Amino acid sequence: MVLETRRLVAPPVQFVAFWAAISLPFLYLPLFSGGLESAEVTVFLGLVALHVVALFLGHGHRNDR
């Protein structure tokens, strides 16, 4: 049951994570353009953490080809 659920859930999660990993760096640009203020440092670190998670989860997307 668990393996069947994983087979159904893993491809969509990898797809979303893969494309999130590609698109998240574009959100860094507005932060860098104005300079990082103290409140924006937290947002930047959150984006970096989210990017690392997206890279980890999405690294196997379409790896079967």
Image (cartoon, helix red, strand yellow):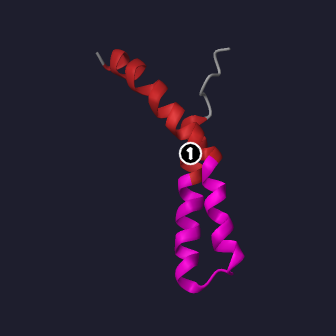
As drawn, the residue found furthest toward the left would be: 1
- Closer-to-camera residue (61/26): 26
Give the residue type that dot 1 points to: Ala
The stretch drawn in magenta includes residue 59: no
- The percent position of residue 28, horizontal first and vertical second, equals 65, 64
Q: From this viewpoint, which residue is outermost toward the bottom?
A: 38
Give residue 55's position: percent from left, percent from top: 61, 43
Q: The C terminus lies in which quarter of the figure?
A: top right
Q: Is residue 65 left or right of residue 40?
A: right
| Residue closest to the eye, 30 or 18 | 30
> Viewed as shown, does residue 6 lie left or right of 51?
left
Residue at 53%, 32% in the rendered image: 15
Mark 1 Cα within 10 Å, few/some/many (few <14, many 20+)? some
Residue drawn at x 59%, y 27% is 61
Q: Residue at x 60, y 28 (%)?
A: 60
**Residue that mark 1 sits on:** 20
Q: Quadrant of the N terminus?
A: top left
Residue 12 in the image: above or below residue 2: below
Q: How many marks?
A: 1
In magenta, the rendered stretch is 23-50
The percent coordinates of residue 51 (x first, y second) are 59, 52
Q: Main secondary structure of the magenta part?
A: helix
Is 36 magenta? The answer is: yes
Label 1 element class: helix
Residue 32, horizontal then vertical, whole percent: 69, 73
- Compared with 26, 58 (above or below) is above
